[in-house]
Structure formats: structure tokens, C-alpha cells
Amino acid sequence: MRTGTPSTSATWSAEAAEAYARNQWDYLPRYTSDGLAPIDNNVLERDIRPFCTGRKSWLFSDTVAGAKASAVIYSLVLTCRACGVDPYAWLRHALTELPQRAPDADIEDLLPFNCTAQKNLPADNDSG
């Protein structure tokens, strides 16, 4: 038969929660002094979810170079999303423009943050 004493896991949980709160106390004034600081990091967690989901798929990259190429493309696609640029339209534009340029040409104008609001991207004329 059980006695009336609390279990160690319940005690540990309360102690852990209190220790966590005390350890985070120094950061609380920063949050309360800046009204723009979010109370949680849900936006960031939502943005990295595809990365965490795709991480298992990347285990099957055959070479280091292939894994690096995947990371570069992933980074560029997320930059498109952060800048409000349609990743598909940007990739199509960049991959059409790159072969037409000299190997040592400046390609900074093709970066996603320089194509904000699709201003530098041609309209998609394909109907399907």
C-alpha cells in the first residue's frame, strides 16, 4: 500500500521548474523592457521545422559535396521565404540567368534578398 508521501518524480518536476525559472530570471527584464521581443519562439520553431523534418532525408546524401549543395539550396529557399519571394519563381529566374553570365560576373543581383517582392522576377507565362 502507498503512503501519503509525494513521489520523487513529482518533487523533481517542481524543483526542476523552479530551478528553470530562477535560471531564466535575468532574461525576463529584457523581455519586459522591449515590447517588440516575442514571449516565445514559435515563429523560429515553425521556420526550422522543415529543416528538422528534412534532416533524416539528408542522411542519404552520397557525398559531402552533395550534402553541402543541399544545404546551400535549402538556405537560399529559406532566404526567399524570409524575403517574401516565391522560391520556385526565384530558382527558375536564377537558373535561367546564371548560364547567360560570364563565370566571373557579379551575381549579387540574383540573390533572393535583391529580388524582394518579385520586382526582378519575370512573370510566369506558363499555363501548366
Image: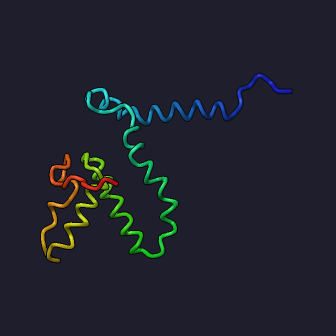
Q: Residue at x 71, y 27 (%)?
A: 6
Q: Residue at x 50, y 62 (%)?
A: 57
Q: Residue at x 25, y 49 (%)?
A: 85
73 or 98: nearer the eye?
A: 98
Q: Quadrant of the N terminus?
A: top right
Direction from residue 83 to residue 10 in the image, left or right: right
Residue at the limit of the structure toward the top, as seen here: 4
Q: Residue at x 34, y 62 (%)?
A: 73
Direction from residue 23 to residue 83 in the image, left or right: left
> Residue 107's image quarter?
bottom left
Q: Position of residue 48 (x, y in %)?
A: 41, 49
Q: Tell me: residue 124, above or below residue 73.
A: above
Q: Position of residue 66 (x, y in %)?
A: 41, 72
Q: Position of residue 65 (x, y in %)?
A: 38, 75
Q: Position of residue 80 (x, y in %)?
A: 28, 52
Q: Quadrant of the C terminus?
A: bottom left
48 or 123: nearer the eye?
A: 123
Which of the colour schemes (rainbow, by chain, secondary structure, one colour) is used? Answer: rainbow
